[in-house]
Image (cartoon, coloured by chain):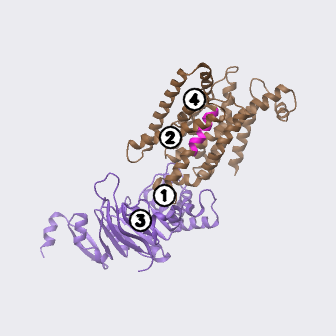
Amino acid sequence: MSRWVWLAVLATLALAAAVLVGPAELGLGDALRALGGRGDQVTVAIVRDLRVPRALLAFLVGGSLAVCGAVLQALVRNPLADPYLLGLSGGAGLGAVLAIALGIGGAWAVPAAASIGALAAIVLVYRLAVVAGAVLDTRILLLAGVVVGSFAAALVGAIMALSPAEHLRSALLWLLGGFDAASWQAVGVFGAYAVVPLVLLVRESRPLDLLSLGEEPARFLGADVEPLKRRLYVAASVLTAAAVAVSGIIGFVGLVVPHAIRLLWGSTHRALLPAAFLLGGALLVAADAVARTAFAPLSLPVGVVTAVVGVPVFAVLVRRWAS
Amino acid sequence: MGELIFEARSASYRYAGAATDAVTRASFAVPRGALVGIVGPNGSGKTTLLRLLLGALTPTAGEVRAFGAPVATWKRRALARRIGVVVQREEPTFPLRVRETVALGRYPHIGAMRALGPADHAAVATALARADATALADRWTATLSGGEWQRVRLARALAQEPEVLVLDEATANLDLRHEMEAFELAAEMVRAHGLTGVLVSHHVNLVARFVDRLVIIDRGEVLAMGPPAAVLTREAVERVFAWPVDLVHWRGVPQFVPLRRAERAASQEP
């Protein structure tokens, strides 16, 4: 039980810190007053319209990416799987950029376009991997994911080179990744797209345990393997796409967070998925706070921070795992 | 003959792209309460046959029934409540405790999200005890030896509280003691707890010591079936394993001894 308390405390601290730090330094009292709508109007606007939605969006996106990573790792039975390496993020990015370039990139339309892109990417990745051999090799699957991701990135580059300037600007801003465009609307859009896939994935906790034993043991223990895998791929694709649509491509959260939880508390998904959501959320909120403030008044793309923190942490985790 | 657990009616299976059937017109039945051995050399089709029985493959011709209905009509979870399968090997992607692994045998009963109840914990404890794996419960599966892993997989199958226990080459990589222990446990579950058992193995001598009936598979066909004493003839064994043998009887059960080339001439003299 105490682990949930720790995670909740960690998440709360990260959210609180993210609201307090920034160009305008706020005390806890100011922030709480502003949250309640009291105090001077500038502070109220900063807290209510900028920092709270930004922190919330970062939390929800970080948690979702971590859940996606955990699910994909069990699904393809490879601890190196994550939405980025499997080409889901790249496909989602292509779908989103295409929608923006075609001028149909409203806040509600971009996640839908990104979902189509992510689903197309995972179908393509799967077909490439199956062509390579009758029995699906998950290493080939990851390789196919990287290839499809690169292909999507190349197409994104082409679209941006050929797009009129005003479209280009909004696509470019988005492509860098991050939460500069965070708003209550973005929180609402993300929540609306994310809630169904999140619930679906968490509901499949024990079947995910079975799948990580292997498909044949999973089948003999009662899992309907093929329909189960399809549901999981679709849900993970839509969830990744929703994250990419509101915050661009952010790597390493989905890779590192599930491993950290597994090392601390084990691998059963009933505990792993909610814990990964909380830790992933806290981590991305903290990373975004660092990205905003480390070189103020300049700010870093949050993906840079997650990579700088994530790569060494991953190296340490792999070493500990091996020993 | 009582109720049939499995029944193959002229069932064939051909893998996509293959020139010949892996299993050809196999017909046989496993009645409730029996302990049946499916034996044959590597590549003879016994694993394919087993997958047909378990509904993991759909026959390309003929029919396979389980519990009186076409096996394809069963939902996987319903089948898993009735059939526990121990496979040869598995490699979990992530570290699990033995107790967590065995508790996954409760999935067919509790589903995707429900927590384990008192009945589930009791079933897990009983299964661990029967498979002599209680002392392993808090270990990580990655630290288990081959024999320990096999006991854990047996325990997981027992935690399903099945009517049928299937060992699919479950002992192929193990030494004699662990193989005997696994077969003894399966036999005990059949005799004392009313289960039906299916042992798939290429260790014909060992299987013959335990089972009521043998199904001998040769190049995808059922060559013979019946009590070991009736079907385990020198001709059958020599044909299936393509090697000269001598048959001896030990407590009424035929056991074959592979002959060296020099011995063959001598054995055929009388």
Residue at image mark 3: B53
Please indicate whether residue B70 sits to the left or right of residue A184 in the image: left
The disc, 4 or 1, on the residue closer to the chain's N-terminal end is: 4
Residue receiving disc 1 = A219
* Earlier residue among tags 4 and 2: 4
Contact between marks 1 and 2 (CB within 8 A): the answer is no
Amino acid at dot 4: Val
Please state which amino acid type lies under the numbered disc 1: Arg
Cα gap from disc 4 to disc 2, whole angstroms? 18 Å
Seen from the viewer's position, the closer of residues B218 and A7 is B218
Between the residue at mark 2 and the residue at mark 3, the CA separation in whole angstroms equals 33 Å
- Could you tell me which chain the residue with mark 3 belongs to? B
The answer to the question of whether label 2 and label 3 lie on touching residues, with beta carbons closer than 8 A, is no
| Pointer 2 residue | A122
Q: The purple chain is which one?
A: B
x%, y% of residue A199? 64, 49
Q: List the residue tagged with mark 4.
A: A97
